[in-house]
C-alpha cells in the first residue's frame, strides 16, 4: 500500500462522512507523536482503523477515530479535528480508499497496560525526528510528514 494523495482539509463540512472508509489519528503530547507497536505486523504505527462492519456506514468517521485511538492505545484525545484525506492505493486489490486524517492532543496520557487481544504491545510519544529512525509503517510516516508540511510544525 502507498499514499497516493493527501488533501488538506480547511472546511470539513465540505466532505460527506460516507467518503471515508476509515480513519488515522495523529495525536501529540508535548509536541511528541503517539505511536504504538503493532504486534501483528511487527512495526510502529499511528492509531488507525476501519469503521466497524456492524456499524458502517452509520458509525460517524469521528467516532471511528475515537474508538480506534482508545482500542489501540488506551488514550483519549482532545480536540480531534478532521485535517486531511489520505488516499491509499492498494495495488494488490487494484483499489483506492479514502481515509480521514484527524489530529488532536493527549493532554494527560494514561499508562498503557497490555490486555490479551490488544493489537498494540506498547505505545510511545516520540519526537518527529525519531520517526525516521524506527521501523514505522511507511504510509503512516508519509501521512505524518504531509500533516507536518500542511500544519507548518
Image (spheres, helix red, strand yellow):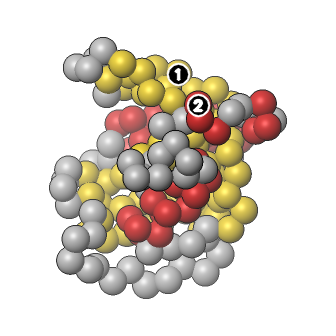
Horizontally, residue 132 falls left or right of residue 99, namely left
In the image, residue 132 sits, relative to residue 20, either above or below, namely below
Q: Position of residue 49 (x, y in %)?
A: 41, 49
Q: Measuring 33% from the left and 47% from the top, which residue is drawn there?
A: 136
Residue at 20 percent across and 60 percent down: it is 39
* 109, above or below 43, in the image: below
User: Residue 57: where, in percent of width, then height?
Assistant: 52, 42
Q: Between 13 and 33, which is closer to the camera in this rendering? A: 13
Query: Judging from the image, what secondary structure is the residue with disc 2 in?
Result: helix
SS category of the residue bearing label 1: strand
Report crowding for label 1: few under 14, some 14 to 19, many 20 or more residues within 10 A (C-alpha): some
Residue 132 location in percent, x, y? 39, 44
Front tag of 1 and 2: 2
Q: Earlier in the sequence, mark 1 or mark 2?
A: 1
Q: Which mark is residue 5?
A: 1
Task: Kindly tell me whether residue 119 is visible in this rendering.
Answer: yes
Q: Position of residue 114 (x, y in %)?
A: 28, 79
Residue, disc 2? 19
Q: Residue at x 27, y 69 (%)?
A: 118
Picture residue at 57% right of the left edge, 40% below the top: 100
Amino acid at each position: 500500500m502507498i499514499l497516493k494523495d493527501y488533501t488538506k482539509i480547511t472546511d470539513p463540512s465540505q466532505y460527506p462522512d460516507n467518503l471515508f472508509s476509515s480513519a488515522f489519528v495523529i495525536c501529540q503530547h508535548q509536541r511528541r507523536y503517539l505511536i504504538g507497536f503493532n504486534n501483528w505486523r511487527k512495526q510502529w504505527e499511528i492509531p488507525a482503523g476501519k469503521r466497524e462492519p456492524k456499524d458502517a456506514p452509520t458509525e460517524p468517521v469521528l467516532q471511528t477515530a475515537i474508538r480506534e485511538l482508545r482500542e489501540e492505545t488506551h488514550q483519549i484525545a482532545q480536540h480531534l479535528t478532521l485535517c486531511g484525506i489520505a488516499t491509499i492505493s492498494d495495488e494488490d486489490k487494484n483499489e483506492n480508499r479514502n481515509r480521514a486524517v484527524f489530529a488532536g492532543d493527549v493532554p494527560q496520557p494514561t499508562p498503557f497496560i497490555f490486555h490479551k487481544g490488544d493489537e498494540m504491545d506498547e505505545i510511545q510519544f516520540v519526537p518527529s525526528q525519531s520517526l525516521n529512525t524506527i521501523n514505522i509503517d511507511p504510509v503512516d510516516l508519509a501521512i505524518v510528514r504531509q500533516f507536518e508540511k500542511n500544519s507548518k510544525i
